[in-house]
Amino acid sequence: MAFLVCVAIAIVRLKDLFAVAMLAGIYGLLSASLFVSMDAVDVAFTEASVGAGISTLLMLTTIAMTGRSEKTSGHKPLLALTVVCVTGALLIYATLDMPSYGDVNSAANLHVVQRYLNDSFMEIGVENIVTSVLASYRGFDTFGEVVVIFTAGIGVLALLSFSRREKDDSEIDSINESMHEEHLVVRIVSKILIPFILLFALYVQFHGDFGPGGGFQAGVIFAAAIILYAMLFGMSVARRVINQSFVQLFAAVGVLLYGGVGVVSMLSGGNFLDYNVLAADPVAGQHLGILLIELGVGIAVAMVVIIIFFNFASRIGFSSEGDKL
Amino acid sequence: MLTHLPALQVLIPLMAAPLCLFLRRPHLVWMFTLIVSGLAFLISVALLQQVMVSGPIIYEMGGWSGPWGIEYRIDRLSAFLSLIITAMSTVVLIAAQTSIDKEIPKNRQIYFYILFLFALTGLLGIVSTGDVFNVFVFLEISSLSTYALIALGKDRRALWAAYQYLIMGTIGATFILISIGLMYQMTGTLNMADLAVLLPEVAQTRTIFAAFAFFVVGVCLKLALFPLHLWLPNAYAYAPSIVTAFLAATATKVAVYLLIRFTYSIFGISFSFTTLPLQTLFVVLGLVGVFVASTAAVYQKNVKHVFAYSSVAQVGYMIVGFSIGTTAGLMATLLHLFNHALMKGALFLALGAVMYRIGSVQLSSFNGLGRQMPFTMAAIVAGGLSLIGVPLTVGFVSKWYLVMASIENGWWPVAVLILLGSLFAIVYVWRIIEAAYFKDPVAGKEPAKEAPLAFLIPIWLLVGANIYFGIDTRLSIQVAQAAAHSLLGISP
């Protein structure tokens, strides 16, 4: 906790954006470990992969695009400071009447949670309760979250995409070339690592039933591998491997797979996302349903993260070209 | 299939959005989007009928009953709101392709429709769900797509406006999320009906007090209540015309819905109006908002800004009606939700038509338009009259009920102030009429042609609705009244 506060203060005070991005990554990692110590392993896993991994990467990409140091602005942040203080005070005020942490008899632990803890294995047959809550009891929320991510991807596409990209690939190539020679060791090491990262992503994807893991984390890890490849071997090479419109369609497929499971269960006589009707045995149906929707989540998340990265990165190509002109 | 209607209403636009990527041709996607929105409209009509006759419908997502799973709960209020949303989106979409051809580059048009469908999904999801966390999820879908839609505007300032909205909107959403978290901690449930039962037991704790405070501030940011309205004028002014028309007619309405839903159905009216001095606070803020925003509207040079500020003022009226706290007041608010959607939809669409022909909506470029684009300008006049509250328009109906409700409650000064607010509306509407009809067009400029039919049809549909519901008020009043009754727990 103390570390967390220190890092946060450092982030606010520092002017060098590169250091800020790095510290933000550390912040993510620290909060992840905080979540672990609070026994929320699944949340910690997500935070580690998203907060410490991908978001730091995206921040770095943005910095590469805009420049490294912050413009100092003259305005006095008094109003903002008051608002923050009032909010903080209200939050602390709210804690005064809260049940103490980990209290078995607190309301949050007595009501709906009881059924999740006691009956979920019987009803769904999945050992990881977090997965069964996410994917089945509150599956519709998770569907919503996937749509949020997809919306973000589409939003980036709508704002940053260009109609003709191929034109200046050759120029980017030459920039990349010069960069590569300097990173020989990193390139070889990562070349060895990438298959393992991809494999690990798949493991996380399908292991969600038993331990922490699932579509969200797997998707992010998978995308991280691809981004690593793109960063080290150049955008144009990576783009030759992964086609843009293919990625877009696949992201849509991910969302549709999730929704499709819901529609199929609707057609087989249940409610939307009612996996019980997917197979003769309700528990088997639940298994099948969760497997499929997690796959949908994984595909959609991975593709969207790739979309966001590629569009950011191709912006860099454009701006550097603009500088030359 | 009929039992699935509550879910289908949200799911059809949701599933249609990724499908758009496969269609690839903007015109095709436009037709598809229009059909989807029309379908959603038909469903909402069917749902409203069903709800009016037989009471709330509950649909269990995933077959898990609440509070364990997520349930959709369509009552009169939500059916009424989804009717407004889907009707407006369908009407606005008729003009969409024509309008965005001029405002958005070809290769981004498909993304425009996808985002539009997601915005529609988000708003519908918020009004249909009976689960507070699900509200937040759909709030995110609608806000995220809205930010991107605004940023698509032709003017580069659109990016800045969208960014401002993004920061304010995210703070608002986070506050709402904090509030939901605090409520869950004290009750252990996220289901609205369940919360309504469990909250009174813990109502006196500081945690619930803080939850309520966070919620009120968060939702006020979303509905642009004075003084938290600063994001709205620029966001509306620089967004693509179609987006402005759709947002002005729906987005703030959904925020008002959230406010009503949380205070009346979840926290309960006695808690809401006693823990915080909410009633006084809202009446004062609402009225100050009316006057400040109306004054600002008078001094704007960009006509989109004029009507954007006027929207802030109209939100003020809705909040005044809400804080009266009686059935009549609530009914006035609901009526105004519906009526304001009609007028602002018509006005912003007409501005879209002007934008299409002239490429600018500065007040100075309106000179002489009255003769060049007679039908479009006539629509603006009709919409403006409705905004002022002239008899035979919807604006009159909602102002009338609002004034009656405040008098009934013994709030004479409030009633007087509401009427005074209309005077400002006369001033800012008159400035546009003056420019369009009494000033000569700028010399040497090619006279503009009348807007294409793709614009005139939806504009006049809305103007017609403005006048129709201003004369024959049975439908709107009946529904608003029934919704208000059921919110206050009175059987009609």
Image (cartoon, coloured by chain):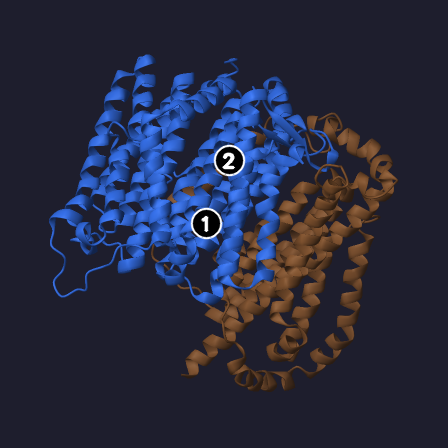
Chain colours: A brown, B blue
Q: Which residue is mark 1?
A: B167
Label 2 and label 1: CA atoms lie apart by 27 Å
Disc 2 and disc 1 in contact, CB within 8 angstroms: no
Q: Is residue B143 above or below residue B30?
A: above
- Density class for disc 1 (Cα within 10 Å; few <14, some 14-19, many ≥20) is few
Q: Residue at x 68, y 76 (%)?
A: A241
Which secondary structure, mark 1? helix
Residue B436, image x and y in percent?
Answer: 17, 49
Q: Which residue is mark 2?
A: B82
Q: Chain of mark 1?
A: B
Front-lying residue, B170 or B405: B405
Amino acid carrying label 2: it is Ser
Q: Which mark is residue A295?
A: none
Q: Chain of mark 2?
A: B
Where residue A247 sits, quadrant-wise, is bottom right
Front-lying residue, B281 or B66: B66
Q: Is residue B403 above or below residue B140?
A: above
Q: Residue at x 43, y 58 (%)?
A: B152
- Density class for disc 2 (Cα within 10 Å; few <14, some 14-19, many ≥20) is many
Residue A56, image x and y in percent?
Answer: 60, 62
Question: Position of B154 compared to B261: left or right?
Answer: left
Residue B242, image x and y in percent?
Answer: 40, 51
